[in-house]
Image (spheres, rainbow, N blue to C red):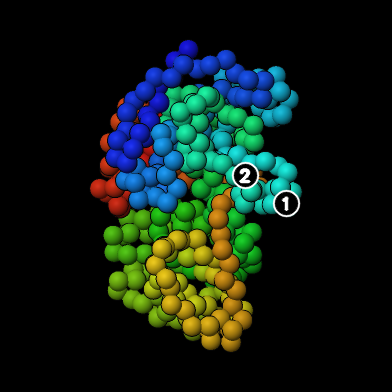
Amino acid sequence: MQSTAVVLEQPRVMRLQEFQVEALQPDEVLLQVERVAVCGSDLPRYTGTSTRLHIPIILGHETVGRVVEMGEQAATAYKVAPDDRVIVEPYLTCGRCPYCLRGRYQLCELNRCYGVTLTCDQPPFLLGGYSEYMVLIPGSRLHKIDEAVPAGAASLASVVANGLRWVQTRGRVQIGETVVIMGCGAQALASVVAAQEAGAGLIIVMGLAKDTPRFVIARQFGAQETVNVEEESPVEAVQRLTAGELADLAIECSGAPAAITAAIDFLRPGGRMVQIGTNATTVPITTNSIVRKELEIIGGLGQTFEVEQAIKLLNSRKHPVEALTSEVFTLTEAEDAIRYALDHPQCIRVALEP
């Protein structure tokens, strides 16, 4: 059997390539890809500006598909069967290092990631979602998902799980608290869902003028207030919307230095900030407010066991997460999809379907 895949050979050079699907090893799974979302982190890999560029590679780590075949050991290890519809977590981990044993497997000392670090120049080749088929190798995590969940939502299970981790696990949001989410991309909007599910009292989403269409989705997901920071400063907005009481929790998804320093100012004493957005720029921060207000600044990476919670949420159909996908392209249009995302920054996610 053959599988068509899109290979990133070098920055800005992608080609369709036919791969022979080899006989499975006993611990491998063959997955037929239903849909893969184009993550924002795929874009700098395409342009060559990413610090984590491994080539040649089949990109794609936000994948939903159907189990075709399983090796004997894999059939025992995974609680899935042929024809099951599943989502694939991006991380492959060892399960033995101190981080895995503590349940923080995204920090695994031997961490690898489908479509990010695993190249396609050696068997089993098909280790990314921009393909008709994927081969899943030891260390994978698969989860069944209901047939009724739209592909546009199912492929974003890890994105929803990220929001749950940042808001609920890392941010420890409490019922009735005021949560400010800075940024308006898919990860930020998933954080709105997580805050709403946790019973936050007031959810404020901040973005730029170009994010106006995204503000509509933010309100649909549960945000009560949206702020255009080009018209009103974040600190003044929080003071106004909370009658001077300020915020309990900030989820900083933008990575913008001004947003990070603003969050320190608009958090009330004892507040927490989960820092998600990254930026190579040095951010000047004075420690006075952090110390005097006894603030917590917490890093946030990716999901762990929150994926199971995310799938239950997606199965419930409470939130139309598929609204995060702006356009869908065929596999043969993969490069067009990436260029569309680069040229249309107002789009949230694009996706590919083989």
Please name whichever residue, 196 or 90, is drawn nearer the observer in this view of the structure: 90
Nearer-N-terminus badge (1/2):
1
Between residue 19 and residue 29, name the one nearer to us: 19
Mark 1–mark 2 Cα distance, whole angstroms, equals 11 Å
As drawn, the residue found furthest toward the top would be 1
Q: Who's the residue at 45% across and 28% down the image? A: 121
Crowd around label 1: few <14 · some 14–19 · many ≥20 (10 Å): few
Taking the spot 43% from the left edge, 77% from the top edge, the residue there is 284
Secondary structure under tag 2 reads loop
Residue 354 image point, x, y percent: 40, 26
Which residue is under mark 1? 98
Report the disc number at residue 272: none
> Does residue 166 appear in this view?
yes
Instruction: Give the image location of residue 200, x and y in percent.
Output: 57, 65
Q: Which residue is mark 2?
A: 110
Q: Is residue 53 left or right of residue 140?
A: left
Q: Position of residue 67 (x, y in %)?
A: 58, 23
